[in-house]
Structures are given as structure tokens and as C-alpha cells.
Image (spheres, grey):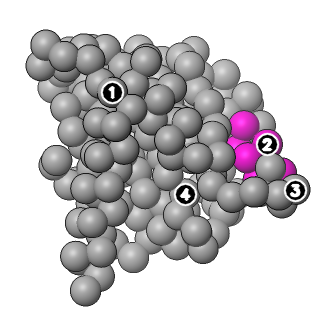
Amino acid sequence: MVVHAIDEDFAIGRVDNLVIVLWIQETEAAAIRRVSEVLRAAHRDRGEPVGLLQVVLHGSKGPDQEAREALIEMLRTGKGVLAASAVVYPGQGFLMAAARAFVSGVAMLARPGFPHMVFPTRGEAADWMARLLPKTQGRYWTASGVNEAVERLITRTSDTAA
């Protein structure tokens, strides 16, 4: 895994053709623009569309207006760059379902032009993403491989915070 950024608010990592973002505390426009840069660089490096998996960790605050606009722009300009995009917004109950509906609504405004879904669990997102990502290094992704990549980035953020 190549780690492109880690701080108290977010982390960006990349494994082959999958870019993973952890939203830890604040979701700020500058961080979203950094994610866009990493996506474009990954696309240039690989010469094919890449996957984006964003995981909202418990306790992370939702994006403000500027960050929402940056998210819409990132999705809008992702056509041809992204093979698929998934957001994991974990939790159960009405409030979490409403939060996932809000995130889905933001994506609808962007009309991304590639598959984009919001999931309540990382396992569901990993399974979906593994089916949509192109082959990498002669092999297809598996749900467990996607989950392992996310775990590696979570571990790196924990190591940095310690």
C-alpha cells in the first residue's frame, strides 16, 4: 500500500487500482481535492479507470457546504477516471439510513457516469467493489482483498496517531 496522506481528519491510500479514503473526523474540501489529485494520478499511472472506496469512520462529521460541492465536483469529473465508487457509511437505525440517503443524494446531483453506491457495511461495499474493479496484476480483486487493503490503511492511521 502506498499512503498518500494521513492526518487527524482523513487518510488516503492506494493498492494497485484501488484508492481508499478514510474519513476520520472532519470532511474538508481541501482533503477532497487531494483525493481527486490521487485519483487522477492513479488513473494516469495505470492507464485505465480505478476504483474509489471511501469509508466514513464512527465519529466523523459530515461535510459542510464547501466540502459537499467538492464531493460533487470530484464525482462529476470522475467519468473515465473511475471504474466504480463506493461509500461506506456504517450504522443502523433511522439516522444512519437518513445519512446514507443524503450521501446518495449528493451523488445523484453529480451524475457521475460510473457505478456509485452507498453501503451500510464495509463487507457489502467490498463485495460490490471487487466485482467491478478491473483485473490488476493478472488477477481479479476479492471482497477479502478489498477488506484487507482497508484494514492496512486503518492500521497505518492508528500507527500514526500513536
Residue type for callout 3: Phe
* Callout 3–callout 4 Cβ contact below 8 Å: no
| Label 1 – label 4 distance at C-alpha | 21 Å
Camera-side mark, 1 or 4: 1
In the image, taking residue 127 as reference, residue 101 lies left or right, namely: right
Residue at point 43% right, 17% down? 132
Q: Nearer the viewer, residue 159 or 7?
A: 159
Question: Could you say where residue 32 lies in the image, as x and y percent from the top left?
Answer: 46, 51
Residue type for callout 4: Val
Q: Which residue is mark 3?
A: 94
Residue at point 40% right, 51% down? 21
| Label 2 – label 3 distance at C-alpha | 10 Å
Q: Which residue is mark 1?
A: 142
Question: Could you say where residue 83 lies in the image, as x and y percent from the top left?
Answer: 42, 19
In the image, taking residue 131 as reference, residue 124 lies left or right, namely: right
Magenta segment: does it hold 99? yes
| Label 1 – label 2 distance at C-alpha | 27 Å
Magenta segment: does it hold 131? no
